[in-house]
Image (cartoon, helix red, strand yellow):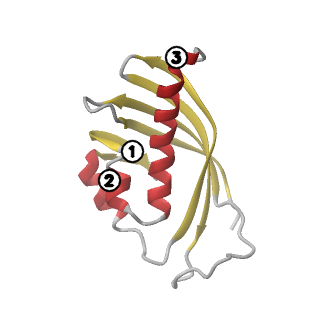
Amino acid sequence: MSRPENLPQFVACQQTVLRLYHTLDHSDYTAASTCFTPDGCWERGGVPLNGQQQILESLRKRPATLFTRHYVSNFLVLEHRGTTAKAAFSLTVYRLDKGEPATLPVAGTMPAMLADVICELTCNDSGDWLIQQLGVQITFVKDE
């Protein structure tokens, strides 16, 4: 996907992924679930979540005091064919839950994990790129 005419699709795919993690970090779980196709699948914590409703139900179980920041890097579109694309990226997660709302700035926190992610996206009839499949392979975790 290195041709200049593919740049808008690249940006749209990347924006969908960034929107997912931004809404997740700001506890907007409804918006996070709509980053997926209606039948999209997110392998989260080793458990496949199928469809927007199951994804939303899982996210709503997160503790209200959980504070996270997800950082996407090394984003690469591996394949692009018309209305489908496959991307890979690295995901760094910072996580804190002390049973009470976090006070900013959070001091002394190290990344909780680093993961390699493969993401399949599809463009719907409205021109929106949505996640069809999101697979996460944890590569590093913080020592406890």
Give the residue displayed 52% in from the left and 33% down from the top: 11
What label does residue 42 carry, if any?
A: 1
Q: Position of residue 69 (x, y in %)?
A: 58, 61
53 and 43: which one is in front? 53
Residue type at mark 2? Ile
For label 2, the residue is 55
* Horizontal side of residue 91 vs 110, given as left or right: left
Task: Determine whether 13 is above or below 3 in the image.
Answer: below
Give the residue displayed 51% in from the left and 43% down from the top: 136
Q: Mark 3 or mark 2: name the one nearer the start of the chain.
A: 3
Q: CA distance from mark 2 to mark 1?
A: 7 Å
Q: Quadrant of residue 130?
A: top left
Task: Determine whether 137 is above or below 106 in the image.
Answer: above
Give the residue displayed 25% in from the left and 29% down from the top: 125
Q: Residues within 10 Å of mark 2 (few under 14, many from 20)?
A: many
What label does residue 5 carry, if any?
A: 3
Residue type at mark 1? Trp
Q: Secondary structure at mark 2?
A: helix
Residue type at mark 3? Glu
- Residue furthest to the right: 108
Q: CA distance from mark 3 to mark 1?
A: 29 Å
Q: Position of residue 8 (x, y in %)?
A: 49, 27
Circles 2 and 1, Cβ within 8 Å, touching? The answer is yes
Q: Mark 2 or mark 1: name the one nearer the start of the chain.
A: 1
Circles 3 and 2, Cβ within 8 Å, touching? The answer is no
* Horizontal side of residue 7 vs 139, given as left or right: left
Q: Position of residue 21 (x, y in %)?
A: 49, 53
Q: Secondary structure at mark 1?
A: strand
Task: Determine whether 32 is above or below 124 in the image.
Answer: below
Give the residue displayed 27% in from the left and 49% down from the top: 52
Task: Determine whether 61 is above or below 19 in the image.
Answer: below
- Residue furthest to the bottom: 100
